[in-house]
Amino acid sequence: MITFKKGGVHPQENKITSQIAIENFPIPQQVVVFLGQHLGVPAVAKVSKGDKVKTGQLIAAGEAFISANIHAPVSGIVTKVDVIPDISGIKKEAIVIATEGDEWEDTIDTSSTINDKIELDKDEIIDRIKSCGIVGLGGACFPTHIKYKTPPRKQVDYLIINAAECEPYITADDRMMIEHGEECLIGIEALLIASKAPVVYVGIENNKKNAIAHLTQLADKKHPKIKICPLKVKYPQGAEKQLVQALTNRHVPAGKLPIEIGVIVNNITTAFAVYEAVQKNKPLIDTYTTISGKKVAHPKNLKIRIGTPINEVLNFVGIPENTGKIISGGPMMGKAIANINSYATKGMSSLLMMDKTESQRGEVSPCLRCGKCVSVCPMGLEPLLLQPFGEKKRYDECEANGIMNCIECGSCQFECPANRPLLDFIRLGKAKTGEMIRNRKS
Amino acid sequence: MQSIIYAAVILGIIALIAAVILHFVSKAFQVIEDPRIDDVASILPGANCGGCGFAGCRNLAEAIVKAGTLEGFGCPAGGSSVNEGIAQVLGLNAVMMNPIIAVVRCNGSLENAPSQSSYDGAPSCAFASSLYAGESMCSCGCLGYGDCMKVCNFDALSIDPNTKLPVVDNEKCVACGACAKACPRLLIEMRFKGKKDRRIFVACRNIDKGAAAKKNCQVACIGCGKCLKVCEFDAITIANNLAYIDHTKCKLCRKCVSECPANAICECNFPPKKDKIELAQETQFVNN
């Protein structure tokens, strides 16, 4: 079974919701759509207070080079454009819409029939991806169209679809492949046209046997260019650099994008969003989210309109007693929510309710120099060195020891027997070192 | 016996040659240094805190001697006495320094700004600040993990366990400014110590609109501008929903303190205020 070479850990999988079908979350009374829910520059609001909007209508435009369009997730009236705290409590600009019915924009095909004939050409597909505001749904929310605007002399050798879903608990991608496999594959075909790549690999971790069987069968029948590749169950299999290495044996250089070595990587749910954009002209207004946790009575996979209040979603499933932490994203790389009165964004792949006993950190003790962090680091770094460098503000040494290569997967901290806050200070050090390098260049 | 004599003679010759070489080298590469630099450096405290803006005490001494004036230089740690000492050595006029001190511009104690979440990550303000708004959800307020305390070389800062806010020790603080640089929220400011240690400042840096600021903290400045109107000395400015008192203009009249509807303006080391009836009687007496 193929996998990446260095390091990695195997956390308890806890894919509780893998057999539970995706359910539609009811449209909320009011949505709050943040203007900066992708990597890069926030979009610019194109509506103002009192405007009437239809579902799918453009409400904020991504005008900068790295930015993405944002569309109304519901129909109704814009009640205000204001600063509103996000899940971290940091105030960001957002558009508030009071829902009235669910009237869709006329250009969007809302039928559920599968349309497998792609009529658009390369540039039209890229333009459609851009206009529909599609961002990478693997977590980073990098605007997808930028990946396909390849520099003229660069040729794309491989298109890779990331369906590893290596984070524990999350099953949204798994369910997506089982329930919308055909659409995903048509979306991948569209991405193939856009990238002009000769071959596409879909990397799926081997704990999703149903999805692998389903997609292999579909691909064999209709999509000869699409190769389904089962991967060994190992975290962080779904990290971009690790996945590229596992599938192509190519190495993405530090600080570079995969396009440098002729590879484009996209998430499977992104491929589904591309299908909806290309074949149905439907912008990205939903997020597929796993709501889970060991103590949650009825964990679910939900399709949620962006801008939905998070506490409504949590109460829909039921917050168990003694919940210590609610995490947006996976337990390894996700972020604990400081403010549950915030709203869903495009990249919200899961909401995990962790019990107090399992969520709290253990007591920190001095480093044992056992070297476990070094052996599990998939980037071959030495977290035990980088942590004190970051903490003591020794950014030159951080840089010399390759802190900028860190992918922040958290394997080191997961494995540390002394419960040291390794990743915390490495993140801080990485941010400050990056700042230092940028200042030096300018 | 003979070998001892040989050794002594040979070593003596080597020493002689080395002495001659060293003599010429010391002449050729002589560095002429102003002896006053040593005199000035010996007066400075020698803590190398960096508060003066130079890397260490000797660098300040060099700069002062080179400039030939005390204008624009000063040792915040040593204060006026050190400055007078330097002035005597160099035969210059001492520049009177207003003593300064670190002031924490946040009053979001546990009582004023109750915690809405709890944090168990690495105890570092810099890291926590990059993660989230803070336990009270005020994205401008003090986080209370003590980055300022850790960088203080003079043991002048401590975190009050009851309020989770830093407390500056009046006696120990030398206003070196290390804490101000360490605070990721830029809450610490170097301000005049004031007569009898009396100071008035806006203990808030929240730039949200009034209602949003008030939601997370009872004593947040709402930028209403009442203080601006009562100030007779033009010391107050308002920008981004936040008032700021210029310590160079403030005359410590305390009018703004009683005017502030949010109790965001702090006064320290003032005697308790006389109540209004007493004041009214006093003014009557003056009028008569």
Image: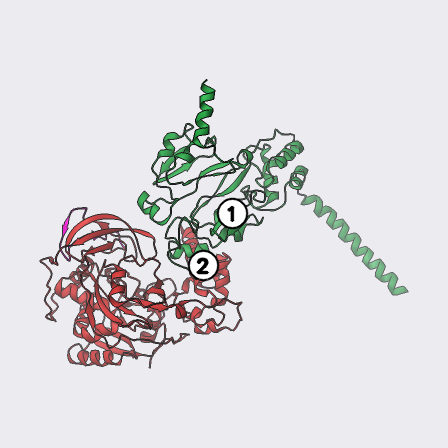
The spot of residue B193 in percent (x, y) is: 53, 37
Q: Regarding mark 1 in the picture, which secondary structure is present there?
A: strand
How many residues crowd mark 1 within 10 Å: few (<14), some (14–19), many (20+)?
Answer: some
Specify whether A108 is left or right of A38.
left
Q: Is residue A402 left or right of residue B44?
A: left
Q: Nearer the viewer, residue B119 or A238?
A: B119
What kind of secondary structure does the magenta stretch mostly adopt? loop
Q: In this view, does B222 lie to the left or right of B158?
A: left
* Residue that appears at 45% across and 28% down: B279
Q: In which quarter of the image is residue A40?
A: bottom left
Residue tagged by mark 1?
Answer: B167
Magenta-colored span: A47-65
Q: Which of marks 2 and 1 is in front?
A: 1
Label 2: chain letter:
A
Q: Please state which of residues A380 and A234 is positioned toward the viewer in this rendering.
A: A234
- Image location of residue A241, percent across then percent down: 35, 69
Q: Disc 2 to disc 1, how far (Cα)?
A: 28 Å
* Circle 2 residue: A429
Res A424 → quadrant? bottom left
Side of A230 relative to A121 (left or right): right
Is B204 a magenta residue?
no
**In the image, residue A53 lies in the stretch drawn in magenta:** yes
Q: Residue at x 22, y 81 (%)?
A: A213
Chain B drawn colour: green
The image quadrant where one finds the N terminus of chain A is bottom left
In the figure, the shade used to draw chain A is: red
Residue at the far top in the pictured view? B288
Pointer 2 with pointer 1, Cβ within 8 A: no
Residue at screen point 33% across, 48% down: B215
